[in-house]
C-alpha cells in the first residue's frame, strides 16, 4: 500500500542518517578507551612519584587525547558536511540554507584546527583548562549545529513526502470528480480533513524551514518535524477512508 510505503520510507530516512554517522564515528577512530586507560595509569604513576619524568609522561598522554579529540571532531564535521553537500535541495531557498550550513561547518573545522596548534605549548594545568574550554565550546556550538545539520538532511527528504501527499490529494480529487462523487457530503468532509492535515503539515514544514534560515538553537525542530509527518500520516488515513467510502457507494449503486 502506497501510504505504508511512504511512511516507512520516512522512518528509513531517519534510520539511515543516524546509522551513517555511527559508521563515520567508527571509521574516524574515535575510540578513546586505550588512551584513557594510558592516562589513568600515568596519573597513578604521578601520584606515586611526582618526578619530572612521570609528569612529562602524563602530559604527553593528555596532549595525545586532546589531539585525538580534535581529529575525531574534524572528521565528524567533514562527514556531516559531505552529507549536507549531497542533500537533495529542491529550491533556491533550501540551497541557500545548505550553503550557509556548509560555511558554518567550515568555520567549526577551522576553529578545531586552530586549537590543535595550541596543544604543543600546554602544561598539565593548561591542558586541563584547555580540555574544559573545548568541551564547553563543543556543547554550546558544535553539538547544536551538528544536530541542526542532521535534521536538515531529514528535512530535505521530507519535502518529497509532502509533495507526494499533495499530488495524491490532487489525484483523488480528480478521480472523485470523474466518478461523480465529489459532492457527496461524507466524502467532502473527509477531503476537507485531508486538506486540513496537509495544510498543517505544510505550515509546520515552514516553521522548520525558518529555523534553518536562522541557524538558531536551542529549538524544538525535531518535535515539529515529527508533528508534520504525523499530519501527513493522518492525511493518508483520510485517503484510505475516502477510498473505502467511495467503494461502498459504487458497490451499493450496482
Image: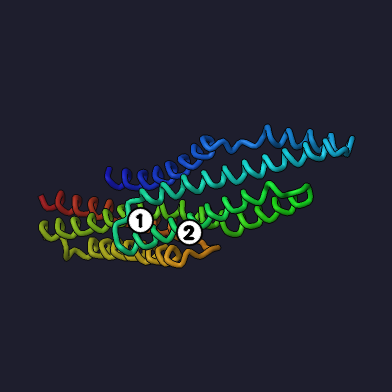
Residue name at image x 54 percent, y 47 percent: 74
Left or right of residue 228, residue 68 in this image: right
Q: Which residue is more in the foreground, 227 or 69? A: 69
Quadrant in which the N terminus is drawn: top left
Q: Which residue is more in the foreground, 26 or 127? A: 127
Residue name at image x 69 percent, y 43 percent: 63
The reply to whether residue 209 is in sight is: yes
- How many other residues sit within 10 Å of disc 2, few (<14), some (14-19) or many (≥20)? some
Residue name at image x 23 percent, y 54 percent: 168
Q: Position of residue 113 (x, y in %)?
A: 57, 50
Q: How is the image coloured?
A: rainbow
Q: Residue furthest front?
A: 121
Residue at which label 2 appears: 104
Residue 171 location, quadrant: bottom left
Q: Which residue is more in the foreground, 131 or 192? A: 131
Callout 1: SS: helix
Q: Is residue 32 above or below residue 251?
A: above
Q: Position of residue 142 (x, y in %)?
A: 56, 55
On residue 159, which mark appears?
A: none
Callout 2: SS: helix
- How many other residues sit within 10 Å of disc 1, few (<14), some (14-19) or many (≥20)? some
Left or right of residue 76, residue 230 in this image: left
Residue at which label 1 appears: 234
Q: Position of residue 172 (x, y in %)?
A: 19, 56
Q: Nearer the viewer, mark 1 or mark 2?
A: 2
3D distance between C-alphas at marks 1 and 2: 36 Å
Residue name at image x 68 percent, y 56 percent: 133
Q: Earlier in the sequence, mark 1 or mark 2?
A: 2
Q: Position of residue 180 (x, y in %)?
A: 11, 60
Amino acid at each position: 500500500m502506497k501510504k505504508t510505503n511512504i511512511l516507512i520510507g520516512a522512518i528509513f530516512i531517519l534510520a539511515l542518517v543516524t546509522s551513517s554517522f555511527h559508521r563515520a564515528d567508527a571509521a574516524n577512530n574515535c575510540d578513546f578507551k586505550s588512551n584513557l586507560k594510558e592516562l589513568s595509569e600515568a596519573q597513578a604513576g604521578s601520584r606515586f612519584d611526582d618526578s619530572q619524568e612521570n609528569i612529562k609522561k602524563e602530559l604527553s598522554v593528555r596532549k595525545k587525547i586532546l589531539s585525538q579529540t580534535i581529529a575525531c571532531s574534524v572528521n565528524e564535521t567533514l562527514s556531516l558536511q559531505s552529507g549536507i553537500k549531497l542533500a537533495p535541495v529542491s529550491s533556491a531557498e533550501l540551497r541557500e540554507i545548505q550553503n550557509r550550513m556548509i560555511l558554518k561547518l567550515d568555520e567549526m573545522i577551522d576553529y578545531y584546527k586552530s586549537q590543535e596548534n595550541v596543544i604543543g605549548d600546554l602544561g598539565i594545568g593548561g591542558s586541563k583548562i584547555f580540555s574544559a574550554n573545548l568541551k564547553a565550546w563543543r556543547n554550546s556550538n558544535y553539538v547544536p549545529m551538528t544536530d541542526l545539520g542532521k535534521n536538515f538532511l531529514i528535512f530535505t527528504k521530507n519535502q518529497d513526502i509532502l509533495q507526494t501527499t499533495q499530488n495524491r490529494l490532487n489525484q483523488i480529487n480528480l478521480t472523485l470528480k470523474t466518478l461523480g462523487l465529489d459532492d457527496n457530503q461524507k466524502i467532502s468532509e473527509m477531503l476537507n480533513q485531508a486538506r486540513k492535515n496537509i495544510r498543517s503539515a505544510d505550515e509546520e514544514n515552514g516553521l522548520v524551514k525558518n529555523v534553518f534560515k536562522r541557524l538558531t538553537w536551542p529549538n524544538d525542530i525535531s518535535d515539529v518535524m515529527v508533528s508534520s509527518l504525523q499530519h501527513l500520516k493522518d492525511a493518508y488515513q483520510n485517503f484510505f477512508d475516502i477510498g473505502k467510502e467511495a467503494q461502498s457507494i459504487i458497490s451499493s449503486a450496482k
